[in-house]
Image (spheres, coloured by chain):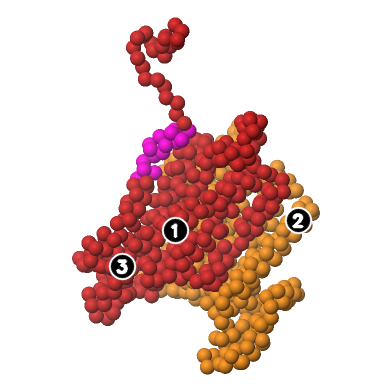
Chain colours: A red, B orange
C-alpha cells in the first residue's frame, strides 16, 4: 500500500473518519422519492390492508361464524324475504340469499387480487418477451411481431372476450387468460420502443464483441434498462385488470357463482338496489377503494421512477 | 399519402379476415346444441339432423366458413338461427342506438376531459389543478358498471322517490320518434360513459399540455406578445392534442364493446347488448356479424387517427 492511499482526501481534518459516500442506484433514488410521497405511502398502506383482509378472509368467516356461501334464511332475511340491513350480527348486512356481505367481500377480495396480480404478471412476461424479441432482432421478426401487436390491439376487446368466455364457460383461469390475452400487446409496444434505442448503445456492442449470446445480452444488458417503464406500467395495469375482472363477473363471465366476487355481488344487487343500499354500496366501495389505491400508488411510482416525471412536474 | 392509405386499408382488411376466422373457429370448436334447442326437447335425432342441415351446420367447417365469407363479401351477413331475421337488419336496428350512446358520450367526454386537462395544466399544483386531478382519478378508478349503478340509484331512484322523475331507469326512444325523449332516455347512459372516459382525457391532456408548455416555441410565442389565451389554445393545445387524438381513436374504435356494459346497465338494445343475448343463444351469425362490424369500426377509427395526426402536427408525414 502506498503512502497516498492512506491520506483520506474526503476528510477535512486528517485522522477524523467520515462515512464514505455510498453510491445510490437509480432504484434507491426512486424508492427514496417514493417514500417521501405521502399519498403514495397511504395508498400502499391501504393496499397492504386489502391484501391482509383477503388473506384473513377465513378468520373473518370464523369470527362472524358465517361461511361465505351459507344462506341464513331465518336470521339473514326480512320476513318479506328481502336482504337484511346491517345489524350487530351482519355488520354490512346480507344479500338476496341471506348471505353475510362482509364475509363475501373478504372472499371476493381474494379473487380480485389474485386475478389482478396473476393476470398482470402474465401480461408483463408475455409483453416483455415479445417486445424484447421484436426490438432486439428487428427485421422480419420485428415486422411480423409488430403487425401481430397491431392486430391484437384492433380487436374489439370486450366483445371478443364475451364470445370467448361464452364458449369456454366462465372460470377463474379463463378470466385471467382473456385479460392477459388482450393486455400484453400494449406492454410489448412500450418495451419494443425502448429496446429499439437501447440496442444501438455502445455497451450492447461491447457485450456482443465480448461474445455474449443474444439471450444473455437481452436478459442482462437490455432488460434491466427497460424495467423502469415496465414496473410503472404494471402498477397502473393492476387496477385496470381488477376492474376488468369485476366487469366480466358483472356480466356473468367471470368466476361463476356461488364463489363471491365483487363484480358478481354487484350484478346480484341490481334487482335490490332500491330496497337494500348496503348490497350495492359495500361491494362497490371495496372495489372502488382498491382500484383507487392502486391508481394513486401507481401515479406515485411513476413520478418516482420515470425520469421524465421531473420535467412534467415543473410545468 | 395514397400508398399509405392503400397499405392501411389492406392491413385493415387483413385484421377483419383474421377476426372472422377466429370467431368462426372458436364457435366451431365449442359444443353447439342450437339444432337441438330449435328442434325441441322431444325431437328425434332425425329432426335434429334435419334442422342441422337446414342451417347448414352439417357442412364441414371450411365450407361453412367459405359460405359465410362469400356472402359477407357481397354485403350479406347471413340470417340468425332462430327467427331467420337477416343479420344486416339486426345490426341496422341496433347500431343507431349504440351510435347515439357512443357519439353523445364521446362529445361530452372530449369537451369535459380536454377542458379540465387544459385548466389543470395552465396552473399546475394549484388548488383547482389538485381538485380536477383528484376528480379525474376518482372516475378513472371507477368501473363503468359501478358508476352506472350509482347513477341509477341516485339520479333515477332517489330523485324519482323524492318526486323528481327527471330520468328514466333505462330503455331507449328513437330519435325520429321523439327527439326530446331520446335525449332524456340517454342522459344517464351518456353521463356514465362520459365521466369514466373523461377522466383519462383529463390526465392525458394535462400531462401532454405540461410538456408542450415547457417547449421553446411557447416561450417564443409569449415573448412575441401573443395573448396567453392564444398561446394556450392555438400554440399549446394544438400540439398537445396528438396523444389525445391517439387515445380518442382507440376509445372510439373500442366503443362498440365499451358501450356494452352501459347498454347492459341501462337496458339499451344496442350492438353490445344484442351480442350478449346472441351469445347466450349461441346464435353464431349474429355474434360474428356484430364482432365484424365492431372490428370494422376499430379499423376505420385507426385510419382516421393517423390522418388526424398529419393535420394536427405538420411535422408528421404519412408514409
Q: Is residue A164 magenta?
A: no
Mark 1 → mark 3, Cα distance in angstroms = 19 Å
Dot 3, how many residues are within 10 Å of its Cα: few (below 14), some (14-19), or many (20+)? many
**Is mark 1 in CB contact (under 8 Å) with mark 2?**
no
- Identify the image quadrant of residue A160: bottom right
Across and down, in percent, residue A92 comes to: 27, 65
Q: Which residue is mark 1?
A: A115
Q: Which mark is residue A166?
A: none
* Closest to the observer, B45 or B304: B45
Q: Secondary structure at mark 2?
A: helix
Answer with mark 1 or mark 3, whichever residue precedes in sequence. 3
Residue lying farthest left? A88
**Number of disc labels:** 3
Dot 2, how many residues are within 10 Å of its Cα: few (below 14), some (14-19), or many (20+)? few
Residue B122 visible somewhere in the drawing: no
Q: Nearer the viewer, mark 2 or mark 3?
A: 3
Q: Are marks 2 and 3 on the same chain?
A: no
Q: Secondary structure at mark 3?
A: loop
- Most frequent secondary structure within the magenta stretch: helix
Identify the residue at horizontal 47%, vertical 74% (top origin): B170
**Is mark 2 in CB contact (under 8 Å) with mark 3?**
no
Q: Which residue is mark 3?
A: A68
Which residues fall within the magenta stretch?
Answer: A26-42
Identify the residue at horizontal 44%, vertical 58% (top origin): A115
| Chain letter for mark 1 | A
Amino acid at each position: 500500500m502506498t503512502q497516498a492511499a492512506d491520506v483520506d482526501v474526503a476528510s477535512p481534518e486528517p485522522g477524523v473518519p467520515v462515512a464514505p459516500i455510498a453510491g445510490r442506484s437509480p432504484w434507491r433514488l426512486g424508492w427514496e422519492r417514493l417514500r417521501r410521497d405521502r399519498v403514495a405511502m397511504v395508498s400502499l398502506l391501504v393496499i397492504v390492508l386489502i391484501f391482509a383482509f383477503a388473506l384473513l378472509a377465513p378468520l373473518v368467516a370464523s369470527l362472524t361464524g358465517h361461511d361465505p356461501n351459507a344462506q341464513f334464511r331465518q336470521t339473514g332475511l326480512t320476513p318479506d324475504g328481502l336482504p337484511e340491513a346491517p345489524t350487530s350480527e351482519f355488520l354490512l348486512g346480507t344479500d338476496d340469499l341471506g348471505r353475510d356481505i362482509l364475509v363475501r367481500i373478504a372472499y371476493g377480495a381474494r379473487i380480485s387480487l389474485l386475478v389482478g396480480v396473476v393476470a398482470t404478471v402474465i401480461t408483463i412476461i408475455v409483453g416483455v418477451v415479445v417486445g424484447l424479441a421484436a426490438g432486439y432482432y428487428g427485421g422480419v421478426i420485428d415486422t411480423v411481431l409488430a403487425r401481430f401487436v397491431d392486430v391484437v390491439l384492433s380487436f374489439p376487446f370486450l366483445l371478443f372476450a364475451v364470445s370467448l368466455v361464452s364458449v369456454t364457460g366462465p372460470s377463474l383461469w379463463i378470466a385471467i387468460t382473456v385479460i392477459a390475452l388482450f393486455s400484453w400487446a400494449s406492454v410489448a409496444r412500450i418495451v419494443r420502443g425502448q429496446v429499439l434505442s437501447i440496442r444501438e448503445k455502445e455497451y450492447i456492442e461491447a457485450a456482443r464483441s465480448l461474445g455474449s449470446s443474444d439471450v444473455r445480452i437481452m436478459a442482462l444488458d437490455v432488460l434491466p434498462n427497460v424495467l423502469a417503464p415496465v414496473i410503472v406500467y404494471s402498477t397502473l395495469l393492476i387496477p385496470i385488470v381488477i376492474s376488468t375482472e369485476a366487469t366480466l363477473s358483472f356480466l356473468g363471465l367471470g368466476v361463476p357463482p356461488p364463489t363471491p366476487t365483487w363484480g358478481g355481488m354487484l350484478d346480484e344487487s341490481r334487482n335490490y338496489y332500491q330496497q337494500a343500499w348496503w348490497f350495492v354500496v359495500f361491494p362497490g366501495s371495496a372495489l372502488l377503494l382498491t382500484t383507487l389505491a392502486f391508481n394513486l400508488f401507481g401515479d406515485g411510482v411513476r413520478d418516482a421512477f420515470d425520469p421524465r416525471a421531473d420535467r412534467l412536474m415543473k410545468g | 399519402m395514397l400508398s399509405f392509405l392503400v397499405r392501411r386499408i389492406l392491413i385493415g382488411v387483413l385484421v377483419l379476415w383474421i377476426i372472422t376466422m377466429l370467431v368462426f373457429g372458436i364457435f366451431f370448436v365449442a359444443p353447439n346444441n342450437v339444432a337441438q334447442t330449435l328442434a325441441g326437447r322431444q325431437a328425434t335425432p332425425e329432426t335434429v339432423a334435419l334442422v342441422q342441415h337446414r342451417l347448414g351446420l352439417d357442412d364441414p367447417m371450411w365450407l361453412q366458413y367459405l359460405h359465410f365469407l362469400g356472402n359477407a363479401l357481397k354485403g350479406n351477413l347471413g340470417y340468425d338461427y332462430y327467427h331467420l331475421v337477416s343479420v344486416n337488419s339486426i345490426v341496422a336496428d341496433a347500431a343507431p342506438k349504440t351510435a347515439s350512446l357512443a357519439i353523445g358520450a364521446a362529445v361530452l367526454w372530449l369537451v369535459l376531459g380536454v377542458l379540465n386537462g387544459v385548466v389543470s395544466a395552465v396552473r399546475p399544483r394549484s388548488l383547482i389543478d389538485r381538485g380536477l386531478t383528484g376528480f379525474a382519478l376518482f372516475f378513472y378508478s371507477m368501473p363503468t358498471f359501478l358508476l352506472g349503478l350509482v347513477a341509477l340509484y341516485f339520479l333515477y331512484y332517489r330523485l324519482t322517490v323524492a318526486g323528481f322523475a327527471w330520468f328514466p331507469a333505462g330503455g331507449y326512444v328513437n330519435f325520429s320518434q321523439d327527439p326530446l325523449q331520446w335525449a332524456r332516455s340517454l342522459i344517464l347512459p351518456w353521463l356514465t360513459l362520459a365521466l369514466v372516459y373523461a377522466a383519462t382525457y383529463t390526465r392525458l391532456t394535462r400531462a401532454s399540455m405540461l410538456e408542450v408548455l415547457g417547449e421553446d416555441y411557447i416561450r417564443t410565442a409569449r415573448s412575441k406578445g401573443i395573448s396567453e389565451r392564444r398561446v394556450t389554445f392555438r400554440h399549446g393545445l394544438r400540439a398537445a392534442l396528438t396523444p389525445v387524438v391517439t387515445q380518442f381513436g382507440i376509445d372510439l374504435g373500442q366503443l362498440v364493446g365499451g358501450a356494452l356494459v352501459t347498454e347492459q346497465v341501462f337496458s339499451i338494445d344496442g350492438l353490445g347488448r344484442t351480442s350478449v343475448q346472441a351469445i347466450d343463444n349461441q346464435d353464431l351469425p349474429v355474434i360474428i356479424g356484430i364482432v365484424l362490424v365492431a372490428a370494422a369500426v376499430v379499423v376505420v377509427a385507426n385510419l382516421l387517427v393517423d390522418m388526424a395526426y398529419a393535420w394536427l402536427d405538420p411535422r408528421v408525414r404519412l408514409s
